[in-house]
């Protein structure tokens, strides 16, 4: 089972968004039969079987094994992945395009960049899986706390300058056999769960404020 699977087909995305099918995908992180899942969810087995067939048709669940019980063959199904991401490729006509309005201080532009990241990496993962090859990627994820908006502004300026120096040092536009890579760096307020909620107005009105559109 994959940790994350990318859904690039519109019909598969539609199938996964059905509430019952979404619950089935969660239930089938641990492979089980339709009868077992139906009992857990309090649904008729026939109904569960119908939804399982739709999920199987789109490759979102797969047969794990078959067990013979008397005159009945029980099919044990499992989700294709523990979690799923729907790529913007599933909605090509309305997928965001960050090249239309590049703005490093725009939250919506950041979202468009993130959507492109999901689309591109999803495409790369699909290709690598088909070729049975590893995909060379690298990512950083962390949190930091700024004492003030001025500190945040100074950090972003220093980060941008440092990244520019690294790009200038390692970028080889004319290298024979070189391969293009995309670099994405993002900074945004952390989203808190539970009793703590995101306060987008934090440090508002002070120097270095992130522009929200």
Image (cartoon, rainbow, N blue to C red):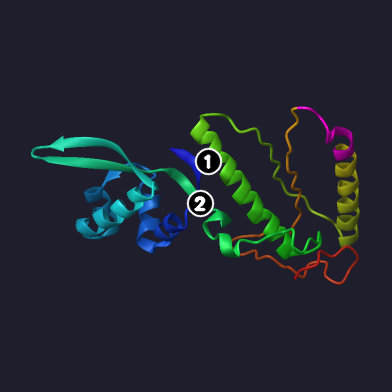
Question: In the image shown, does 108 or 152 lie closer to the viewer?
Answer: 108
Q: Does residue 189 lie above or below 32 as drawn?
A: below
Q: Position of residue 116 (x, y in %)?
A: 65, 53
Q: Earlier in the sequence, mark 2 or mark 1?
A: 2
Secondary structure type for disc 1:
helix
Q: Going 33% across and 48% down the picture, which residue do you hit?
A: 56
Q: Which mark is residue 126?
A: 1
Q: Are marks 2 and 1 in contact (CB under 8 Å)?
A: yes
Question: In the image shown, does 188 or 40 lie closer to the viewer?
Answer: 188
Could you tell me what secondary structure mostly forms the magenta stretch?
A: loop
Residue 134 falls in image quadrant: top right
Q: Does residue 56 lie above or below 188 as drawn?
A: above
Q: Is residue 79 left or right of residue 158?
A: left
Q: Position of residue 86 (x, y in %)?
A: 52, 54
> Total of numbered circles in the picture?
2
Quarter of the picture containing the C terminus is bottom right
Residue 154 falls in image quadrant: bottom right
Outermost left residue = 71
Write down the residue under mark 2: 8
Asked if the magenta segment contains residue 170, the reply would be yes
Quarter of the picture containing the N terminus is top left
Secondary structure type for disc 2:
loop
Question: In the image shown, does 193 or 44 lie closer to the viewer?
Answer: 44
Q: Does residue 168 lie above or below 57 as drawn?
A: above
Disc 1 crowd, CA 10 A, few/some/many (<14, 14-19, 20+): some
Asked if the magenta segment contains residue 92, the reply would be no
Q: Going 47% across and 53% down the picture, which residue do you hit?
A: 9
Residue range (magenta): 167-176
């Amino acid at each position: 089972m994959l940790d994350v699977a990318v859904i690039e087909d519109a019909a598969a995305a539609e199938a996964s968004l059905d509430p019952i099918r979404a619950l089935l995908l969660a239930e089938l992180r641990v492979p089980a039969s339709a009868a077992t899942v139906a009992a857990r969810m309090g649904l008729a087995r026939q109904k569960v079987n119908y939804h399982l067939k739709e999920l199987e048709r789109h490759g979102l669940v797969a047969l794990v094994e078959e067990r013979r019980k008397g005159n009945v063959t029980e099919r044990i199904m499992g989700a294709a992945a523990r979690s799923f991401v729907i790529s913007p490729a599933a909605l090509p006509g309305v997928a965001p395009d960050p090249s239309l309005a590049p703005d490093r201080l725009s939250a919506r532009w950041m979202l468009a960049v993130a959507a492109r990241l999901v689309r591109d990496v999803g495409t790369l993962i699909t290709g690598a899986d088909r070729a049975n090859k590893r995909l060379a990627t690298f990512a950083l994820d962390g949190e930091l706390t700024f004492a003030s908006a001025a500190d945040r502004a100074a950090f972003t300026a220093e980060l941008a300058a440092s990244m520019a120096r690294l790009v200038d040092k390692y970028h080889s536009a004319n290298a024979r056999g070189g391969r293009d890579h995309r670099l994405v760096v993002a900074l945004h307020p952390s989203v808190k769960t539970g009793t703590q909620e995101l306060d987008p107005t934090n440090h508002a009105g002070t120097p270095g404020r992130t522009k929200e559109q």
